[in-house]
Image: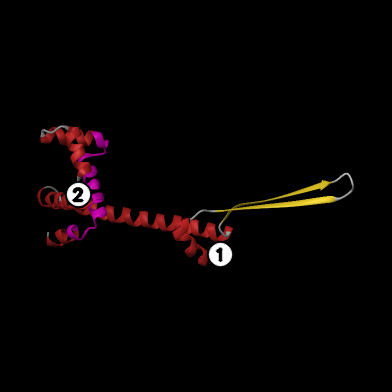
């Protein structure tokens, strides 16, 4: 049990909350949040609205500490395997989300690099012939760049090879 306790204690706040969420899904089955809240409030003899306000007021670190406590209590009193499965699934989900975010960022950076930061380009040429035979040519070019903000612009400029 010591090893599982150490694993629970070592969980990051997000992983602890996700593991508890997955454990609740294992134990209660898939239910909408409002139904779980109503069941919990009924069991505790509380008003669901007041309970929801208290839950929203909780600090993330406090919620994560409570999640760790519930995971440990469930492992000790109900089913250690369910807790281990929830921790493993939370870790896999976090890994997959990180891979997806890195992939999306990579695609965005590749797109910016391929387009050199240009969102659109247009060129309009207007030729006017005056009655006296003079020709006036007007060339108008418009370039729209993606807006990445003042903080990221220098970094992106160095990646794209621009000194502007």
Q: Which of pointers 1 and 2 lies earlier in the amino acid sequence? A: 2
Is 162 inside the magenta-drawn segment?
no
Q: State the residue in front, 19 or 153.
A: 153
- Determine which of the numbered discs, if any, sits on residue 63 in the image: 2
- Dot 1: element: loop
Which span of residues is magenta-colored? 8-34
Split into 4 quadrants, where in the image is the C terminus?
Answer: bottom right
Q: State the residue in front, 159 or 39.
A: 159
**Direction from residue 160 to residue 59 in the image, left or right:** left
Query: x, y percentage for residue 127?
Result: 80, 48
Q: State the residue in front, 127 or 112.
A: 127
Q: Is the magenta stretch mostly helix, strand or loop?
A: helix
Residue at the location (27% across, 36% down)?
A: 32
Residue at the location (86% across, 50% down)?
A: 134
Split into 4 quadrants, where in the image is the N terminus?
Answer: bottom left
- Packing grade of label 2 (10 A; few <14, some 14-19, many >=20) is some
> Vertically, is 87 above or below 43?
below
- Determine which of the numbered discs, if any, sits on residue 164 in the image: 1
User: CB of mark 1 within 8 Å of CB of mark 2?
Assistant: no
Is 32 inside the magenta-drawn segment?
yes
């Amino acid at each position: 049990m010591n090893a599982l306790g150490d694993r629970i204690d070592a969980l990051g706040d997000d992983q602890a909350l996700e593991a508890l969420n997955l454990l609740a899904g294992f134990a209660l089955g898939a239910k909408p949040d409002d139904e779980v809240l109503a069941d919990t409030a009924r069991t505790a003899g509380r008003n669901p609205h007041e309970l929801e306000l208290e839950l929203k007021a909780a600090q993330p670190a406090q919620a994560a500490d409570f999640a760790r406590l519930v995971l440990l209590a469930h492992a000790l009193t109900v089913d250690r395997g369910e807790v281990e499965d929830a921790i493993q699934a939370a870790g896999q989900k976090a890994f997959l989300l990180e891979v997806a975010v890195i992939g999306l960022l990579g695609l965005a950076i590749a797109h910016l690099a391929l387009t050199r930061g240009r969102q659109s380009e247009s060129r309009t040429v207007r030729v006017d012939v005056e009655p006296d035979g003079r020709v006036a040519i007007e060339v108008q070019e418009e370039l729209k760049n993606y807006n990445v903000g003042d903080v990221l612009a220098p970094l992106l400029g160095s990646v794209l090879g621009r000194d502007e």
